[in-house]
Image: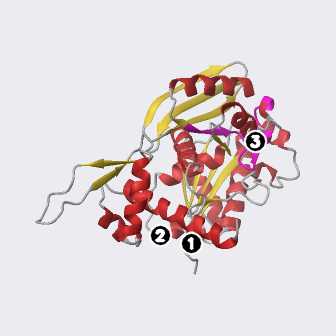
Amino acid sequence: MDNISAKTMMIKKLNIELVKEALIETDYATKLTISRITGLSVATSGNILNELLERKEVIEIDTEQSNGGRPARRFVYNFDYCHVLCIHVDCHQDIFTLYYAVVNLGGKILEEDSKELKQLDYETIAATAEKLLAKFTLIKAIGIGVPGVVIDNEKILACDIASLADVPLGEKLKQDFEVEVIVKNDMNLKAIGFSKQQHYESEREKNIAVVNFPSDNCIGSGIILDGHVLNGSTNFAGEVSFLPFDKRSREHQIREMVDPDKLFLMMVKTILSLIATINPNMIVLTGDLVREEMLEDIYAQCNKTIPKEHVPKIIIRNDMVHDYMQGLIAVTVDSLSCDIELVKKRR
């Protein structure tokens, strides 16, 4: 395909996404409404609507009341055009937990459940997917959340669940079920889910770090900068357990976190490092080692080191299961969209 043809296809995909977004953001829309929202011509808007209508991604409803002329056709987005399956897994004190949700394109959960397991591996995840794909035949994408380093949205490298380490999870699921598959780090998904539930008024507020302090594993974080996940060049961003805590090994860190004084010092060093490097608007502390009564002392230590105007809001959110699933739903639904994104120019 030559460059002109490729650009034409890209523009068409982008225009389709603009029309879909306009429909999703309104209760219903006409060709004229879509044209006004997107900036596309009425003719282009109509052609795209007809294309979406033909494949049942858009539904036509009753026409508008006529003011003397021909009544305008009204359209709504069909959130049940297809569904997605979201699965995230966790391990705590040698107990594995698998959570799943089948969701439509509007984020409505059609079925969800969780189960504790004595072992968890690729076969366990595949068996869950197979069962739900047979029941919900409109599933077109699977999203997986794991406590580990993920590359290319598919392959798991280091993982807190040893049986999933070095497993090309996304590739295998694609081969077995022939659907779109995306695999993401758990802390990034928690950060995405939490971020999407906030009501921002400016770009500056879209800078968040979520930091996890579990009792049986290393510290981890998920970072949102200007509304986007910070992955880094090798998807290693957020692996704060590798910060130089007095040159101690990660295994040593886990053992030392049972000591309240050493844990507190580690928390403060981690928070100070994040403030100095990414300057977030908010830091969310989570994990079973975090306590509400720690906040006052954390602020005091931060203010001793960093000018007060740069110290962000720090909150504690012990239960982030809902945030985790909301983040996973968002990225899985998004995986079915065009991969072109318009980004506002930074100044």
Residue behind mark 3: 218
Foreground residue among 197 and 248: 197
The answer to if 190 sits in the magenta stretch is no
Q: Mark 1, residues whose alpha carbon is within 10 Å: few (<14), some, or many (≥20)? A: few
Crowd around label 3: few <14 · some 14–19 · many ≥20 (10 Å): many
Closest to the camera, between mark 2 and mark 1, is 2
Give the magenta-colored segment's residue range. Answer: 140-163
Residue type beneath disc 3: Cys
Q: Residue at x 57, y 41 (%)?
A: 324
Circle 1 is placed at which residue position?
Answer: 309
Along the line of sight, the residue nearer the viewer: 322 or 155: 155
Type of colouring: secondary structure
Label at residue 202: 2
What is the secondary structure assignment of the residue under circle 2? loop
The residue depicted at 59 percent of the width and 63 percent of the height is 340
Secondary structure of residue under mark 1: helix
- Quadrant of res 38: bottom left
Q: Nearer the viewer, mark 2 or mark 3?
A: 2
Considering the image in quadrants, where does the C terminus appear?
A: bottom right
